[in-house]
Image (cartoon, rainbow, N blue to C red):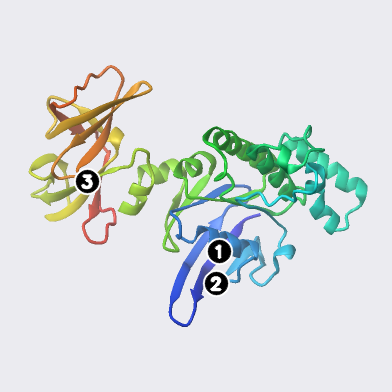
Amino acid sequence: MDIRLVNLTKIFADKNSEVRAVDNLDIVIPSGKLIGLLGPSGCGKSTTLYMIAGLLEPTMGQIFFGDEDVTNLSAEKRGIGLVFQNYALYPHLTVKQNIMFPLQNMRMPKAEILARTQKYARLVGIEDLLDRKPKQLSGGQQQRVAIARALVKEPKVLLLDEPLSNLDARLRLQTREEIKRIQRETGITTVFVTHDQEEAMSISDEIVVMKAGVEQQRGKPQDVYEQPVNQFVAKFLGTPPINIFYGKVEKGGLYIGDELIGSSNLEDQEVNIGIRPEGFEISEDGTLSVEVKQVEHIGRDTSVVASNKNTEKETFRFIVESGVEVKEHTTIKVAVKPNKCYVFDKIEEKRVQ
């Protein structure tokens, strides 16, 4: 079942101020897909999730589950499963009792309750932990219990609000793989909220990048990464982050400072130029001179911290492939790989090339 958000808006107001937390969000979340709402703190992603869940009332706009307008339905009538960042398990109940709890509230027959509890405990891999209390579980195990409790109702929609934030790096990796597996096995339409771009890129079928309550870009993770529509998206996605240089277009040439790095069909103007760390290559024919400040070895690749007076920051970073030797405190020539350069409008920061 798909989810449609039509001009969805949420305004928080008091006597002295007004905050437009979500601003005319208009998107479709396809049936059976896992969609990541991604953005920095305060961008409106959790507010959007809570409106989908029925925990917050929109100021304007509509929410549809399939063809049904659920904008004014209470949370319990929407058929959603919700998993919070802090797990929200009952400490005095066992794992089994925590999973059973929502079904007991629905007054479901006992045999069906037990069958579903076993089914979803098995699905999330905690069937051997049913008699334990939450305090006897690891963080990853507690999160699996929370997911099983959300799924046991067999909801139309699964909503995950920063579900991995309290886990260490190893458990985050393991649990996000589990979430993707569970979502694929159940085929449930899922909305996953996170500020962690690596999480969103790895787990989502599509991502929606948000800023100040406004959708910036939506698409398959790799497409959004490779074809950012503006400088915000380009800078938000990518580790290490994209390098931004002060540049210009002059007589068909694209320049960083006085150094020609490519061509452009834009009119003469000042621009910002974005180049990702993997977008450089060391070349004797390279037109960009850089001073190597630091060399770091990361697996088979080498990460180089260098300086150029035209960068947004004092230094920038690029990746060198295995086998290429780079020495610190030297000046080298680098070239920009084809199709690895993004040109942004100086004022509005929209991508123009």
Label whose residue precedes the other's in the sequence (3 or 1): 1
Compared with 52, 336 (above or below) is above
From this viewpoint, is residue 52 visible?
yes
Q: Secondary structure at mark 2?
A: strand
User: Residue 161: x percent and y percent?
Assistant: 58, 52
Q: Left or right: where does residue 268 sit relative to residue 184?
A: left
Label whose residue precedes the other's in the sequence (2 or 3): 2
User: Residue 52: x percent and y percent?
Assistant: 61, 62
Q: Along the line of sight, which residue is nearer the eye, 209 or 224?
A: 209
**Residue indicated by mark 3:** 313
C-alpha separation, residue under disc 2 versus residue under disc 3: 41 Å
What amino acid is at disc 2? Gly
Q: Along the line of sight, which residue is nearer the eye, 301 or 223?
A: 301
**Residue indicated by mark 1:** 5
Residue at the image position 37 percent from the left and 38 percent from the top:
239
User: Residue 99: x percent and y percent?
Assistant: 78, 47
Q: Along the line of sight, which residue is nearer the eye, 322 or 141?
A: 141
Label whose residue precedes the other's in the sequence (1 or 2): 1
Q: Are marks 1 and 2 in contact (CB under 8 Å)?
A: yes
C-alpha separation, residue under disc 3 versus residue under disc 1: 39 Å
Of circles 2 and 3, which is in front?
3
User: Residue 165: x percent and y percent?
Assistant: 54, 45
Residue at the image position 60 percent from the left and 58 percent from the top:
3
**Residue indicated by mark 2:** 61
What amino acid is at disc 1? Leu
C-alpha separation, residue under disc 1 versus residue under disc 2: 8 Å
Residue at the image position 83 percent from the left and 58 percent from the top:
105
